[in-house]
C-alpha cells in the first residue's frame, strides 16, 4: 500500500490526514507551517482537530505544500456510501465513457424528440438528488445518444449528447470520481465540434473550471474563467442564455477571489453577477447553470464562508428563504454552507441541525461532500458528550 493510500484511508478529520502526510515526509509542524505560509499555532490546531479545514483555499494550500492531491487529504469517496447503489453502477459508467463512441453496440434507435425527452428527464432526476436513478440510467442514455449520433447528421443530437456528458461530469465530480468527470468533459469537447450551438463551448469551459477548483488548480481556473468571459463578450450577443453563462462565470470568479482571501474581488464579482441577474429576471436553467436569484444568494453565503466570515454568511442567509431554491440538490449545497458558517462561530448544535436537514434532502450528495464530512469530524472532536443527532450523522458520512 502506498503512503498516499495510507493518507487517504485514514479515518478522522482532514487535519489528522495532514498530520499523517507531514509525518510521512519527515517534517516538523514548524516546517509544514513554513511551507504552507500559516502560523505554527494554526497548524497545531488543525492537526489536533481543534480547528476545521473549513475553507477550500486552506485545503488546497496544504495539499500543494505537501505535494499531494486534494483527494488524498479529504478521503474523497465515502467508504460507507460505496456500498450504496449509486457507487455500484460506476464500473458500468466507466466502461461507457472509455468505450464510447468507439464501440457502439446495435440496439434500438430513438427519434430526436424521444432523445430530447430522455435527456431532459435525466437532468431533472440528477438535479432532484436522485443520484442512484441517474447513474442507473446514464449508461443506456449515453449509448442511445452515441448510436443516434453515429447514424444521423442531426446537429441537435450532438447538443443533447454534450448536455448529457455535462450532467455526467457534475454527478461524477460530486461523488469524488474526478478522473471520470474529466473524461466526460473531454468527450463533450470532442462532440462540440459538430454541435450547432457555439455557447456550448463556454458551458463546457464552466465544467472544466469547476474541475480545476475541485482539484485545487486555482490559477488555471482563474485563467479559463477570464478567457471564457472575454470570449462571451466578443460574441456581441446579448441574450438570456449568454447572460446566464456570464453570470455563472462571475459567481465562479467570486469563489476564486474568496480562495485568494480577496473580499473586494468577491464583492466586485458578485456585483457583476447581480447586474446580469437584474437583466435576466427570474430563475433560468440555460446549460444547467440554474442562474437566478437563488443561485446568487447561495454564492453570497458560500463566499462569506470561504472567507471565514461565518457571521456574515448567517446575516446573508437571514435575508433569503431556502425554499426559493428550486432543486433539492442545490438546497442541500446551500445548507452545507450554512452549517459550515454555524461551525465557524462555534454554534455546533445549529450546525448539526442544518446538516441533518441537508442530509434528508439529498443524502448521497451530502455524504460524499468534502466539507460536510470535515464538519462532522470536527464537531465530533469538539464535543465532550456527542449528541445523538451528531452520532447519526457521523455514521452516515462514515467518519466513525
Image: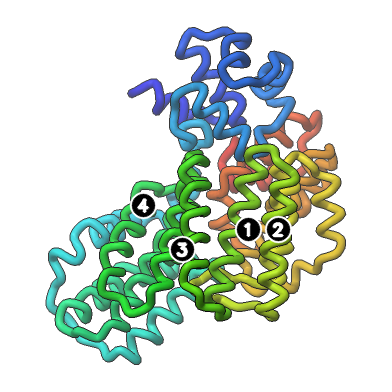
Quadrant location, the N terminus: top left
Residue at (60, 46) in percent of width and height: 256
Q: Which residue is the site of mark 1?
A: 251
Where residue 177 appears, x then y in whole percent? 40, 49
Residue 170 x %, y %: 46, 60
Residue identified by numbered label 3: 231
Q: Residues within 10 Å of mark 3 (few under 14, many from 20)?
A: few
Residue drawn at 52 percent across, 67 percent down: 233
Between marks 4 and 1, how big is the CA–CA gap? 21 Å
Q: Are marks 3 and 2 in contact (CB under 8 Å)?
A: no
Looking at the picture, does residue 305 appear above or below residue 39?
below
**Quadrant into which the C terminus falls:** top right
**SS class, disc 1:** helix
| Alpha carbons under labels 3 and 2: distance apart | 20 Å
Q: Work out whether mark 4 precedes mark 1 in sequence or the reverse, and give the earlier one.
A: 4
- Locate residue 57 relative to residue 192 in the image: left or right: right
User: Is disc 4 in contact with disc 3, using a CB cutoff of under 8 Å?
Assistant: no
Residue found 58% across the figure and 63% down from its top: 248
User: For the residues marked 4 and 3, what is the alpha-carbon distance in whole angstroms?
Assistant: 22 Å
Secondary structure, mark 3, is: helix
**Mark whose residue sits in front, 4 or 1:** 1
- Name the residue that disc number 4 marks: 182
- Of the two numbered discs 3 and 2 on the same chain, state the one appearing first in sequence: 3
Amino acid at each position: 500500500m502506498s503512503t498516499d493510500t495510507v493518507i487517504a484511508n485514514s479515518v478522522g478529520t482532514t487535519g489528522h490526514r495532514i498530520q499523517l502526510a507531514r509525518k510521512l515526509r519527515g517534517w516538523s509542524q514548524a516546517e509544514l507551517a513554513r511551507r504552507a505560509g500559516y502560523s505554527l499555532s494554526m497548524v497545531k490546531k488543525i492537526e489536533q482537530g481543534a480547528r476545521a479545514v473549513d475553507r477550500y483555499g486552506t485545503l488546497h494550500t496544504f495539499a500543494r505544500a505537501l505535494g499531494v492531491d486534494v483527494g488524498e487529504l479529504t478521503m474523497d469517496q465515502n467508504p460507507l456510501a460505496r456500498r450504496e447503489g449509486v457507487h455500484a453502477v460506476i464500473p458500468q459508467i466507466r466502461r461507457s465513457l472509455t468505450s464510447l463512441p468507439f464501440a457502439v453496440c446495435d440496439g434500438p434507435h430513438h427519434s430526436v424528440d424521444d432523445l430530447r425527452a430522455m435527456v431532459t428527464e435525466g437532468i431533472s432526476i440528477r438535479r432532484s438528488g436522485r443520484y442512484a436513478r441517474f447513474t442507473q440510467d446514464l449508461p443506456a442514455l449515453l449509448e442511445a445518444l452515441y448510436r443516434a449520433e453515429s447514424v444521423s447528421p442531426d446537429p441537435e443530437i450532438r447538443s443533447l449528447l454534450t448536455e448529457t456528458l455535462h450532467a455526467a461530469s457534475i454527478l461524477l465530480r460530486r461523488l469524488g470520481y474526478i478522473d471520470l468527470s474529466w473524461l466526460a468533459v473531454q468527450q463533450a469537447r470532442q462532440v462540440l465540434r459538430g454541435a450547432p450551438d457555439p455557447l456550448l463551448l463556454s458551458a463546457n469551459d464552466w465544467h472544466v473550471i469547476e474541475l480545476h477548483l475541485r482539484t485545487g488548480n486555482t490559477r488555471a481556473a482563474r485563467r479559463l474563467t477570464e478567457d471564457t468571459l472575454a470570449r462571451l463578450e466578443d460574441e456581441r450577443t446579448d441574450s438570456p442564455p449568454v447572460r446566464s453563462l456570464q453570470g455563472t462565470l462571475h459567481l465562479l470568479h467570486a469563489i476564486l477571489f474568496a480562495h485568494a482571501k480577496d473580499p473586494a474581488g468577491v464583492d466586485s464579482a458578485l456585483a457583476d453577477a447581480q447586474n446580469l441577474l437584474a437583466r435576466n429576471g427570474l430563475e433560468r436553467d440555460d446549460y444547467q447553470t440554474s442562474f437566478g436569484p437563488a443561485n446568487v444568494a447561495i454564492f453570497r453565503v458560500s463566499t462569506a464562508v470561504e472567507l471565514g466570515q461565518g457571521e456574515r454568511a448567517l446575516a446573508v442567509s437571514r435575508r433569503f428563504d431556502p425554499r426559493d431554491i428550486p432543486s433539492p440538490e442545490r438546497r442541500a449545497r446551500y445548507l452545507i454552507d450554512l452549517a459550515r458558517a454555524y461551525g465557524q462561530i462555534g454554534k455546533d448544535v445549529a450546525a448539526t441541525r442544518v446538516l441533518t436537514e441537508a442530509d434528508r434532502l439529498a443524502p448521497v450528495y451530502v455524504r460524499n461532500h468534502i466539507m460536510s464530512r470535515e464538519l462532522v469530524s470536527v464537531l465530533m472532536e469538539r464535543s465532550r458528550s456527542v449528541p445523538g443527532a451528531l452520532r447519526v450523522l457521523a455514521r452516515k458520512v462514515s467518519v466513525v
